[in-house]
Amino acid sequence: MVKRTPIAAILLTVSLVAAGAGNTWPENLNRLKQSLCLVEYYLPQAETNEIQDNTRIKQKITGILVDEAGLVMTSDIIFPANIDIVARNRFYAQIQSPPEDITVSFEKDEKYAATLVGVDEDLRVAFIRISQSENLPEPVVFRSDHALETGDPVYLIQHLNGRYNNEVIITSQNVNSIQEKPWLKWLSVGAFTPLSAGGLVVDPQGDPIGVVYRNNAMSVGSHFDIDVPMTSGALTELLPAAVFRQLLTDPPKLELQYTGTGKSWLGIQMQVLTSEMAAYWGLDTLNGIIIMRVMPNSPAEKGGLQMGDIITSLGELEIKGEDSQAIEVLRNHIRSLPDGPVPMIIWRDQRPLSKTIILESSPKSQFFAEEYSEEKLRFSVKELTQDIILENDLDFDTEGVWVSRVEEAGAASLSGLVVEDLILSIDNHKIRNLEDFKKEIQASMDSDPQLIQVFIKRQDKTLFIYIKPDHML
Amino acid sequence: MQNLIFIILLIVIFNGYGSAQFVLQREILQAKDRVLPALVHIEPVKEVFTSGKKVKFQVTGSGVIFSPEGHILTNNHVAEKARLVKCTLANKEELQAEVIGLDALTDLAVLKLDLTEKPHLELPYVEFGDSDSLQVGQFVLALGSPLGLSRSLSMGVISSLDRYFEDSGEMVSPFNLWIQTDAAINPGNSGGPLVDLNGKVVGINARAIFYGENLGFAIPINTAKLVVDRILAHKQVERSWIGIEWQEIKEYRKYKNLPQLDGVLIADIEQNSPALDAGLKPGDIVHSINREPLSAVYREELPKIRKMIAEIPVGTRINIEYSRNGYRTQTSLSTALRGKFEGNEFECAAWGLSVEEITSRIVKNLRLDNSDGVLVSGVRIGGPAHEAEVYRGYVIKYIDNTPVKDMDQFQKLYEDLKDIPEKGIMLRMFYKNSIRYGLLMGE
């Protein structure tokens, strides 16, 4: 007994020290913690074998209140869709409807309804707005002039995952590396797997300076996990406030009547000019990007750019370097410019050429293409957007609508129609777009036909399908 | 008394049953004796291109001798790309064989045993039967080397005679229906004979479905007879081509409410084809060719139409009667030679890639404008082409600034240029409306 007393005393001392350490956390961290919120929503599950999505999954992610009117910034995984065709973050996502029944809760239990405002597909952040602004905590006011260096300490305020009841967790970490391109990011060796991206980055003075951007485990529980970034190990990417500051006052807006995302496109595919290639062509010191492909009806095509042209400057940007990041830098530069004319210098046949190209807003993707469902025949079609043309390597002048959903064992399915068939004509009437389709299918159905003849293209072949409207037993 | 009758009856029944079984057993043994001596275990060494490199490997298949001179019938997929073919006869004698001709479209090949060292060897050979007179339910034997187990025999019945398979990638059979049998067929049976109880070859075993049970498929011998004749005469099978994909009219008849209509529907027309030039369109119904009526109400009737056109001598002017929007009319066209199924491949070892000839099939599948250039079929990891980010599937159309028309020209340019100069060799490549530059640098 006598011998055990000192051990107990030592243990007591250790726990007192630990408790003391807790008291040294800056008061700011506890205040900022209150602006962190849990965003809950339902994501409809995209099903191509039903003509509407019938199931939805409840998900939770981290958000930050950024203004007094209830604007919350969060991760873009809330809406996993490519909105314009240039942002090709999600190669496998097909049809995706926006999230439903979004609610937001802060430290107190009360839940507030919210709606999706918009998504920035390049920075991969999303904004939602709480439908009322009373009784909300203080919004976070970011400092965007804090330049961190490798080794600098930071605090991260995040949520734990569901196993720990989504409690707030504050960790102390360091900036382990800095990435400059295509925009500034701080990299930190993360210690655990938080609920999601979207947590707050705070400097040692207690000032909020950025958000947790991506980390290696965005496991929000479903097959949308294609969002898992390309970082290895437990690396966490932190996004400085300077990069997204502008979005806080002018957040991206998602409108179902698509009018463009406000991001510009040129309409080309690119290959980097290497120094060996430049030397081969006798353009020794030239840095540039080779145009591999010019998209139809794009600003590039209208401006007379051609396959094989080498871009050396665009607006203020001079192409530098010969790694794949040069492509990312040019791409982001183009997307950041407003619609309208921009001067370019290209090299063609070993000679420079000045061009002015009129940039346009990037065209919508299949996610925002209108979908039309034929209720009786149990299938849906979408207009042919450029991303579908590209993904399926269709000829640039292809016209028609593509089959986006076919209900299993419905009339269309029983007649042999499958998802991704391209509809070229109905009852011998050419289908160029969704309007033609609506008109012709309606006309056909009005005549109460025994069979409807649908001429389709499937992979490399065309064939006729005969849909029997009363195929239902 | 009653007991006696019962016993007599039992003996009669038992004897009758016993004799039927005996007859069947005798027929099986006789049929086996007619075919087994001519059965061949084939082990070709194949040369293929993979990841830009030429590699060799051995496979096992089956075949059957059908002439006293030592001709062997087997599958194209057994004999294609073979540089060396080792054959083991039923008496375990080993001989080399030469590939006389291949026909990918029917999956058949003809080999010939090399008898130079044994000129007096008397070879057993089989007789071909008539696959058109087969019946579902008829007993058949399958002989071959399943999973390499040579001289194996299995037995079953004919399960179906009009099995139709759509073409899928390399698995094509546009000109024939298949004999389906429940006789066990496994990998290695390919090229072996399916035999009736008269000991005549009625089919060549070629496919099986492995997640099913006892679902084997043989090419009817009547399809093979024609191919054998053509290969023996010309070493290859030339066929006419007009560029039409056909579709059966079963649903079209209902759609138009014309239950008596005869004809065949045009589903697709290939680019640069005689049919396109003759003004034919998808949706047209063809009724006759050179006044010979054509009709395919069901898809099982499509192979005979394709076969009929294929067998017209190449370059023949033919008259096509068709209807469009209910009006009958006609047109004429000259058939063209059907292009090679598979092009030659060539390894450019010094550049670290392999290229393939652009056949009409590649033009069609990749929707190319023409057959200019060569197709990159593989890239060796770590080689100059890999470093230059040359990818499989691109068409090389220029080397430095010299246009590449075809494989012959490519090979000449390669031989001249294969040692890469200091400034490199520029490949200008195309893939569906896009260009890519690949600068090959020396290692």
Image (spheres, coloured by chain):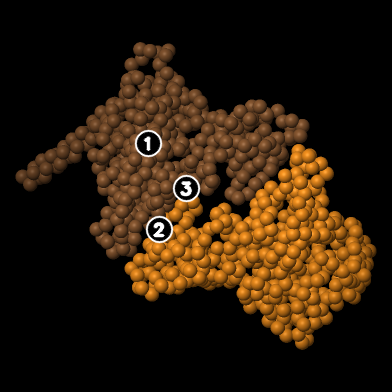
Chain colours: A orange, B brown
The residues bearing labels 1 and 3 have C-alpha atoms spaced at a distance of: 19 Å
Q: Comparing marks 2 and 1, which lies closer to the viewer?
A: 1
Q: Can residue A125 be seen in this view?
A: yes
Residue displayed at 29% across by 48% down? B288
User: What kind of residue is marked 3?
Assistant: Gln
Residue B253 coordinates in the image, percent (x, y): 30, 60
Residue displayed at 47% across by 62% down? A423
User: What kind of residue is marked 1?
Assistant: Val
User: Which residue position holds label 2?
Assistant: A464
Image position of A151 with respect to B218: above or below: below
Residue displayed at 86% across by 62% down? A173
Q: Is residue A276 visible?
A: no
Q: Return the residue nearer the eye: B403 or B427.
A: B403
> Left of B421 or right of it: where is B210?
left
Q: Which chain carries label 2?
A: A
Task: Check disc 3 and report its element: helix, strand or loop.
Answer: loop
User: Which residue position holds label 3?
Assistant: B271
Image position of B206 with respect to A72: above or below: above
Residue B252 coordinates in the image, percent (x, y): 33, 59
Crowd rating for badge 1 (residues with CA inside 10 Å; few <14, some 14–19, many 20+): some
Q: In which quarter of the image is the C terminus of chain A?
A: bottom left
Please tell me the numbered disc located at residue B314. Answer: 1
Q: Quadrant of the N terminus of chain A?
A: bottom right
Crowd rating for badge 3 (residues with CA inside 10 Å; few <14, some 14–19, many 20+): some
Q: Who comes first in sequence, dot 1 or dot 3?
A: 3
Residue B149: image quadrant is top left
User: What kind of residue is marked 2?
Assistant: Phe
Tell me whether marks 2 and 1 sit on the same chain. no
The residues bearing labels 3 and 2 have C-alpha atoms spaced at a distance of: 19 Å
